[in-house]
Image: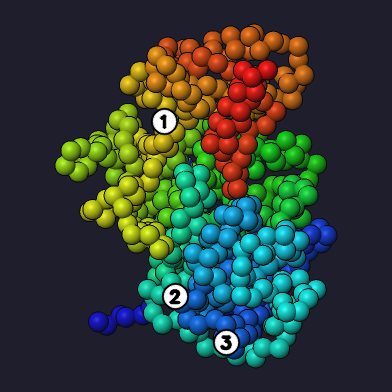
Amino acid sequence: MMMNYPLTLAQILEHARHIHGSKRVTTLLPDQTFHSYTYTALYERVKRLANALTQSDVIQPGDRVGTYASNTYQHLELYYAIPGIGAVLHPLNVRLTAVQLARIVQEAGDKIIFVDGVYAEQFEALREKIGCEQVVHLNPSAMPPDVAYEHLLSEAEPAYSWDIPDENWAMGLCYTSGTQGEPRGVLYTHRSMFLHTLAVNQADVFGLTEADVVMPLVPMFHAMAWGLPYAAMFAGADIVLPGAKPLCLADLIAETGVTVAAGVPTIWAKVYPELSERRQDISTLRRLIVGGEAMPPTLIEAYEKNLGVEVCHAWGMTEMSPTGTFSKLREAHQNLSDAEKWRIKAKQGRPIPGVELRLAAETSNGFAKLPWNGEVVGELQVRSPWTASRYYNIQPTTEHFTPDGWLRTGDVATIDVEGYMQIVDRAKALIRSGGESISSVALETSLLKHPSVHEAAVIGVPDEKWGERPLAVVVLTPVDAVSNRTDTDLAITLKQHLVPEFPKFWIPDRFIVVDEIPKTSVGKFDKQALRKQLLSAETKEKLS
Ligand code: AMP
């Protein structure tokens, strides 16, 4: 071996401090004022924190350390200090219930949990059920026997030598959001996260530069904030952390000059009216990175055409650190019509360098590879140096991993000749009617194009004759919600809207209008909850 240099997160932090030491991390605090400091100041605090953790005697290399926190500079410090001492960063989803958290914390064996001031009360209510040896409060008002974070830092020595046994040492643990059953743990290594960072920082992927101001709106507990805390600092970009609940995103973008922001489509749908009124100058914003769920093409078009902001789909999974594909137009697409461009941009994108995709059909003796022609639908499988080959504490099963080393994503997709992948559905969400598949995603996308529809979710409901039939649940735009139109009129209108695009058996038999579609802890449509809600409403109706 001539070039045997370990790939660890310490290299990212050291590079950031040496080469981009004056770059800034700005956090929006709960009182809507800013905390702002340089990479150099962050680095010094990370080293103090590393010392404090090492000297606490509670944490040994390999131990898991939980965080229950929003997107702040302190959380960013923990993102570096915990892996830097050879321990494992375990960001906890603050939207989970006590029962879910208790299971996760106990399975992970978290030795300490760092708790954000904004969630302190919420945490206190769950604390007994969760059970954890030690709690450190990120706000200064910790009561004994808990420890206050700032006190810990002020007492600690400033010098520290990173203590990472090797690049294959675990650095982080994230649990899946549990939309498809119980949350499962995914362990990342220094090497896998380092390689993921290099991959997403390519020009045709996130393409971050030192001139950028990057704002992860995606919570830092969701799939390692899509790797942005590492990618942005490796690129030397300024970082804006929005805390728990920014009151006005448009103001935040205008005041801090954000150039690239990342979050789920629900956020972008909510913030669009705010941004398009544009009393604030948001001209710095050049790109949205959108993932977790498909962004409706109409919304992509609205951002690009009306606001001049490029929208790029990123598809991935907690299991994939999380990035797998990224959707940008190719040079060859520049002369296409706008409609053609939006059609391509609505796809989830091409595999980023290092990621291999496979479209597969299960056969009696394994999997058959399906063609990439944009039409054939198959099970999406993936492998890469940053994709998990098993779950934490669970023996790998063929339900999730193939014997030849691919992750079965649970997504059903097409891939075209240029390599653009498009999610058709989740395997379990695909509606089977009369033995044929119906894509809920395609129906939802089309419904969203109707001017009266603000949100749309299509689910399969049991049917005696066909096995399952599609049922559409829609939230109307505010103007339509108060109109006098009857539900029957609406159903007729929406059916007419769908008919030209889909086979007859795809058209939902029923349309239900609701005020709100339930969302999961990471802001995606929660179809399980929706199904339960509708079912209990129908049962009540039958009983009355
Ligand atoms: P999670 O691990 O919670 O991020 O969930 C991963 C799942 O979210 C994927 O398997 C997809 O079903 C879905 N997903 C992620 N990104 C996208 C995207 N850009 N478009 C559509 N679905 C997505």
Element assignment for label 1:
loop
Depth-wise, is mark 2 or mark 3 nearer the camera?
3
Mark 1 vs 3, N-terminal side: 3
Q: As shown in the figure, which amino acid type bears the numbered disc 1?
A: Leu
In this view of the protein, can residue 529 be seen by the observer?
yes
Mark 1 vs 2, N-terminal side: 2
Q: Marks 1 and 2, Cα distance to the nearest angstrom?
A: 40 Å
Q: Residue at x 58, y 36 (%)?
A: 529
Residue 486 x, y percent position in the rendering: 69, 10
Judging depth in this view, the residue of 321 and 305 nearest the camera is 321
Image vertical order of residue 215 relative to residue 425, above or below: below
Element assignment for label 3:
loop
Element assignment for label 2:
loop
Left or right side of 425 for 120:
right
Left or right side of 59 for 375:
left
Q: Which residue is drawn at 52% across and 50% down?
A: 177
- Dot 2, how many residues are within 10 Å of its Cα: few (below 14), some (14-19), or many (20+)? many
Q: Mark 1 points at which residue?
A: 430
Q: As shown in the figure, which amino acid type bears the numbered disc 2?
A: Thr
Q: Name the residue under label 3.
A: 57
Mark 2 vs 3, N-terminal side: 2
Q: Name the residue under label 2.
A: 8
Depth-wise, is mark 1 or mark 2 nearer the camera?
1
Q: Marks 2 and 3, Cα distance to the nearest angstrom?
A: 24 Å
- Dot 3, how many residues are within 10 Å of its Cα: few (below 14), some (14-19), or many (20+)? few
Q: Does the residue labelled 1 lie within 8 Å of ligand 1?
A: no
* Figure quadrant of the N terminus: bottom left
Q: Which residue is farthest left? A: 365
Image vertical order of residue 372 relative to residue 451, above or below: below
Depth-wise, is mark 1 or mark 3 nearer the camera?
3
